Image (tube, grey):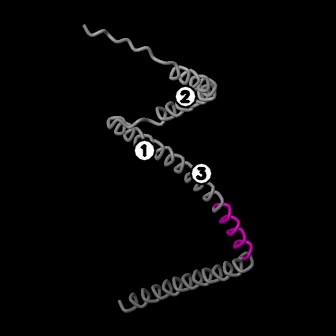
Amino acid sequence: MVKKLMVKKLKSVGKDSQLSATIRESAQQIWLAGLGAFAKAQQEGNKVYDALIREGEAIQQKTRKVTEDKVTEMAAKATGTWDKLEQVFENRVARSLHSLGVPTRDEVATLTRRIAELKVELDKLNTAKPKAAAAKPVRRAAAKAAPKKVVRKAAA
């Protein structure tokens, strides 16, 4: 039985040492692969770095364009919203002023235009009036100079 245990132990030691050798060999290969990757990264590092920079710049430009488009779109929507809000406000103010009897801009403009027309007419009349005014005082003077006939009724 001792012999059997010794044989088993030797077989297991052989398996352990074989397993250890396989593990060591794998670890060595992993180490060498890491060293190779490191060397490759050093060689290709600058190229990769430059390529990443170019990609980053391209993405930044695309992002900036999309952002500017969105900002422009939102600004247009905001302007439209402000225009609508302003129009609602103007309509409400106009209704309030109308209910108070305050004339509108168009009504004031019409009145101003009519006043200008009337002023022109008045100026025409004023330029024609001095000729007529010069003739009238003569008539008045002649009328005042003539004696008035007084008719008295006889006292009965």
Which amino acid is tagged 3? Asp
State the residue at coordinates (42%, 86%).
8
Per the image, is 129 magenta? Answer: no
Asked if residue 154 is positioned above or below residue 77 in the image, the reply reads: above
Per the image, is 52 magenta? Answer: yes
Residue identifier under label 3: 69
Q: Quadrant of the N terminus?
A: bottom left
Which amino acid is tagged 1? Leu
Of mark 1 and mark 2, the one earlier in the sequence is 1
State the SS at label 2.
helix
Question: Horizontal and vertical percent for residue 99?
Answer: 32, 35
Question: Horizontal and vertical percent for residue 37?
Answer: 67, 78
Q: Seen from this angle, which residue lies furthest left? A: 156
Residue closest to the eye, 117 or 58: 117
Which amino acid is tagged 2? Leu
- Are there few (<14), some (14-19), or many (20+) residues within 10 Å of tag 3? few
Answer left or right for 129 relative to 148.
right
Answer left or right for 1 relative to 47.
left
Q: Which mark is residue 70?
A: none
Residue identifier under label 1: 85
Asked if residue 71 is positioned above or below residue 33 in the image, the reply reads: above
- Are there few (<14), some (14-19), or many (20+) residues within 10 Å of tag 2? few
Asked if residue 46 is positioned above or below residue 66 in the image, the reply reads: below
Question: Horizontal and vertical percent for residue 6?
Answer: 42, 91
Question: Horizontal and vertical percent for residue 109?
Answer: 51, 34
Q: Is label 3 or label 1 in front? A: 1
Q: Seen from this angle, which residue lies furthest front? A: 156
